[in-house]
Image (cartoon, rainbow, N blue to C red):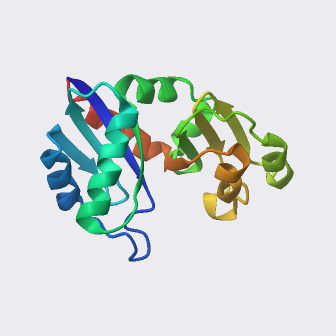
Amino acid sequence: MTTYIALFRGINVGGKNVLPMKDLVALLERLSFQDVKTYIQSGNAVFRSKVKSPAVLSKSIRSSVKSSFGFEAHVIVLNRDELERAIRSNPYPEAEAEPKTLHVFFLDSRPKNPDLHRLESVRLDSEHFKLVDKVFYLHAPDGIGKCKLAARVERALGVPATARNWRTVQKVAALAKGKE
């Protein structure tokens, strides 16, 4: 069995795409996933499965959400090693002391033609970003609300993404570590 992390994008935001975590746990258990745990309402789930393909898992989860709840949910599935590699690869360790200022964008795939110049053009002087394989790191010490480039990441990279602040990444990683 492998430990996986499912990161949902755009659920339980502003009363749209409502998916209570207890219902998400039940849905994942119906898919024969084991030891299902969730963290906060924004859609972070940790589970174990015999399935070896994150892409197959993502497709299965998306399909089940559509048939059970009537909306499309974008889901990025990582194995525990991928999450731990993203944590180890953090290029801004100094930002870890203020975890709400550090954001990790998990990408569906490695961008083929990322337009980092587009992001650089809207970056505030205090902000820093770096693309590492299938992970985009953003350090926004003045807050994500003032950060113009955050809303442009997905389009500039050309691949679907979902972001979590460093605190959430750490909490989800702790859940995942308790699985094996």
Would residue 58 be seen by someone viewing this image from the given angle? yes
Q: Position of residue 63 (x, y in %)?
A: 31, 53
Does the image show residue 140? Answer: no
Q: How many marks?
A: 0
Q: Residue at x 13, y 48 (%)?
A: 30
Left or right of 129, for residue 46? left
| 5 left or right of 104 in image | left
- In this picture, residue 82 sits left or right of residue 106: left
Of the 4 image quadrants, the one containing the C terminus is top left
Q: Quarter holding the N terminus?
A: top left
Residue at point 82% right, 55% down?
Answer: 122
Quadrant in which residue 22 is drawn: bottom left
The residue shown at (68%, 45%) is 158
Residue 4 falls in image quadrant: top left
**In which quarter of the view is residue 94 placed?**
top right
In this view, 133 is above or below 6: above
The location of residue 162, given as percent across then percent down, is: 51, 49
125, 134: nearer the viewer: 134
Residue that appears at 66% across and 55% down: 150
Placement of 163 over or under 79, stated as above or below: below
Q: How far across and how far down the image is residue 144, in percent? A: 62, 58
Foreground: 174 or 62?
62
Residue furthest bottom in the image: 15
150 vs 1: above or below: below
Q: Which one is in front, 87 or 6?
A: 6
